[in-house]
Image: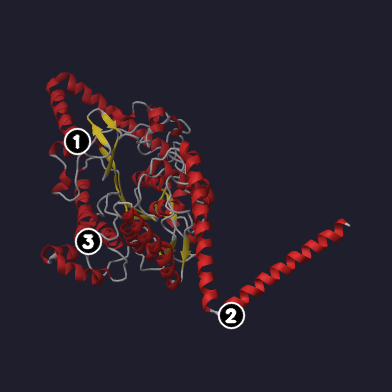
Amino acid sequence: MQIVSSWLTLPDTVRSPAPTQSNLNANYCACDSNSQACLSCYLLLLKQKGEEKNKKERKVESVKECCARFRSFLNARLTHRLRNVRSTFTGSGYRAAPGANLFDRLRKEQPGFASQLKPVFGDMMLPGLGISDSDRQMLERNINVVFHSAATVRFDEPLRVAVEMNVVAVRKMLALGRALHNLEAFVHVSTAYANCDRPYIEETVYPPPVEPQKIIDVLEWMDDEMLELFTPKLMGEKPNTYTYTKQLAEHLLMTEGADLPLAIIRPSIVGAAWKEPVPGWIDNYNGPSGICIAAGQGILRSMKGDYNAVADIVPVDISVNIMITVAWYTAVAKPKNIMIYHATTGGCNPFTWGDMSGFVNKSFHQIPLEGCFRRPNVAIVGNSFLHDYWTCVSHLFPAYLCDVAFRLMGKKPRMVKLYNKLHRSIDCLQFFTCNEWQWSNSNHDMLKHQLLPADLKTFYFDPLPLHWPTYIENYCLGAKKYVLNEDLSGLPAARAHIRKLRIIRYVFNSVVAVILWRVLIAKSQFARNLWFFIVGLVYKFVQHFRITSTMNKS
């Protein structure tokens, strides 16, 4: 759950042309007084409102010192409750986890940005989102824009948990949104695959086979064992509980959120950053990140998929910029109906799974990971028989061979267990690598024409200029730096390790070839005759080469 208040700090580059706070108005643009507020002016207006609220709060605190002591007490409790969270918030702002480099650029450009953050503890599984009364009152007074992107993204999540987090929590967020006095935009982040049972998906909400409330009612009395049996029938043609519950959530928003300034964004497969905060930034193993890392380590060699199918990957910074722009347009234009926006790349800048496998292999040969199991060489295989063959030859056989070596050395075997986990993960992705979809982008294109050129440059979300080979190279580098925390100073050793693995591969293949050939010669008369024929042919070629060389010298 992400709640954005008017305590927003803007870089100077956002203000183009630079509007002054004196001529800002919610309904008019400082850059063009005849139009509604542009994106830069709207964000600056939010900042101005926040500064005014902070001034009022400081006046109240100077009169009532006990309020400051009470706030310090709440901050101390909040810090204590969040110590085990990866990204720790404190009463004075944000304290990043050790090694967190997402905010390095922001720290450099705006050293005091942490003081603008107001942490709120919450839990989607708890009543009222687990927000305390004091925090709820603070939100009700100060929040202007809500981004709801919290969800479980596990494809194999049990239906009960997926419905609770992806559907019921949406209803709780709607209730919170109605309580916000100054709400101007409520942006819900769905997925472009919420309707993946359709080959062409328009910017509309499709009705689910079963009403969300009926599913919620069923979960109240059905036990887990029975629910597991009925889950495939309930999902129909949906491949997993994630896409199924996302469709339910969209329908719930349409039926119960019509009274709110609501918009829905559907990103496709979210990948590493294109430009901001740094090219290639990523911090998790989800989606293509896990595939890239497994391929870079030489563990993943074969993946079932359509070589020519479009891999609709959208950089995370494009998704974020669309979210910001949609929030602005929803607040300023106030559309009568709930607008849906697709954040996809395949329609204007297609990129296939075959392209991705080739770029990943090339990138990891140039910037290899440390301690690779094998040389990077992943392949997208469409034929089921060939995929099963390569899975046995390139996955299971090396895994069992390695575990035998581990046992002989007195170590705990782990490769078979690792490959079983890998196979479960790529099996969940198989539906998306074997199929492709087309999405309507009318609202997306309309949004681009609503922005001023300066805002469109700052809040870029057009994927047409994206150069995929460079992007995948930065993606692999980002996985190495930000996910695996590998320093680039170790590249020479990593490249030497890759060369060693190449030599081992050549030696192993040569030994296997000699052994097989010796077995064939011993068992087959045809193989022996073929061997003698090849040796004789080579001998005659050498003799001819020697005679020709002697004649040329004379």
From this view, report whether residue 12 is shown above or below residue 315.
above
Residue 77 visible? The answer is yes
Mark 3–mark 2 Cα distance, whole angstroms, equals: 59 Å
Mark 1–mark 3 Cα distance, whole angstroms, equals: 35 Å
Tag 1 residue: 138
Q: Give SS at disc 2.
A: helix
Residue sitting at x 17%, y 33%: 80
From this view, report whether residue 379 is shown above or below residue 229.
above
* Closer-to-camera residue (386/317): 386
Q: Nearer the viewer, mark 1 or mark 3?
A: 3
Q: In the picture provided, is 476 more to the left or to the right than 166?
A: right
Q: How many marks?
A: 3
Q: Nearer the viewer, mark 2 or mark 1?
A: 2
Residue 90's mark?
none
At label 1, which amino acid type do we have? Met
Mark 2–mark 1 Cα distance, whole angstroms, equals: 87 Å
Q: In the picture provided, is 123 more to the left or to the right than 150?
A: left
In the image, residue 458 lies at what x, y percent?
46, 39
* Closer-to-camera residue (417/245): 417
Residue 158's mark?
3
Residue 435 visible? The answer is no
Of callouts 1 and 3, the N-terminal one:
1
Pointers 2 and 1 in contact (C-beta within 8 Å): no
Q: Nearer the viewer, mark 3 or mark 2?
A: 2
Residue sitting at x 26%, y 55%: 258
Residue 526's mark?
2
In the image, residue 500 lies at what x, y percent?
50, 49
Q: In the picture provided, is 395 more to the left or to the right than 356?
A: left
In the image, residue 149 lies at what x, y percent?
30, 49
